[in-house]
């Protein structure tokens, strides 16, 4: 696996660094030599993201990700969010099409489309910060986001 190869190539910094970017996006379980056609769409996007992470950053890149959390374990989603936050802090812009509330709640800005999916959608229902969208009664996303944000607020208040 990538995780095993990362350990094996401990003494080869250039190889180790490339493998580290794959670990950073939660792909440590992928087998070396695994055919690209066996990867899910989310996994393939994360391979591309790993390639971007291995390049010299300019801080002027636009990343567009389409449901990158599909099929991911909660732990791997957290790894992905850490990578995305790093890219953002470097000055890059990230646009994500996503249904996962753990990702949505970390957004700087949400554009909620609906009211339904497919032919029943396509209209802008709500825009704003996660807190603003959570207060919009027309937003299905806001309806499910609100309790999650309340728990997050309660947890951060307890820490103080």
Image: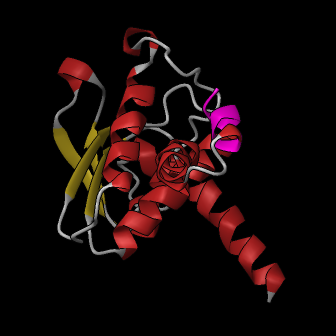
Q: Residue furthest bottom?
A: 160
Camera-nearest residue between 17 and 117:
17
Q: With 97 as the anchor, is 81 left or right in this view?
A: right
- Kindly identify the residue that appears in the image at 53 percent across and 43 percent down: 19
Quarter-of-image position of residue 116: top left
Q: How many marks?
A: 0
Instruction: Say whether residue 90 is left or right of residue 18.
Output: left
Residue 22 image position (x, y, % from top left): 51, 42
Name the residue rendered at 49%, 51% in the picture: 103
Q: Which residue lies furthest to the right in this view?
A: 158
Is the N terminus in the top left, top right, bottom left or bottom right quadrant? top right
Q: Does the magenta stretch include residue 87?
A: no
Instruction: Give the overall secondary structure of the magenta segment.
Output: helix
In the image, residue 103 sits, relative to residue 87, either above or below, namely above
Decide which of 144, 82 is in the foreground and name it: 82
The residue shown at (50%, 45%) is 15
**Vertical relation: 29 (above or below) 75:** above
Asked if the magenta segment contains residue 3, the reply would be yes
Identify the colour scheme used: secondary structure
**Residue 67 visible in the snapshot:** no
68 to 63, vertically: above or below = above
**Quadrant in which the C terminus is drawn:** bottom right
Q: What stretch is highlighted in magenta?
A: 1-7
């Amino acid at each position: 696996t990538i995780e095993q190869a990362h350990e094996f190539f401990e003494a080869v910094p250039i190889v180790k660094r490339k493998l580290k970017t794959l670990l950073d996006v939660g792909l440590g379980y992928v087998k070396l030599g695994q055919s690209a056609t066996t990867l899910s769409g989310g996994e393939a996007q994360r391979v591309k993201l790993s390639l971007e992470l291995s390049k010299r950053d300019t801080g002027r890149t636009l990343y567009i990700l389409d449901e990158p959390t599909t099929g991911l374990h909660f732990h791997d989603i957290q790894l992905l969010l850490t990578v995305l936050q790093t890219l953002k802090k470097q000055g890059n812009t990230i646009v994500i099409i996503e249904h996962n509330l753990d990702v949505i709640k970390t957004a700087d800005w949400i554009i909620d489309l609906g009211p339904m999916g497919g032919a029943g959608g396509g209209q802008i229902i709500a825009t704003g910060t996660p807190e603003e969208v959570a207060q919009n009664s027309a937003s299905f996303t806001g309806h499910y986001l609100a309790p999650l944000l309340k728990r997050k607020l309660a947890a951060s208040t307890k820490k103080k």
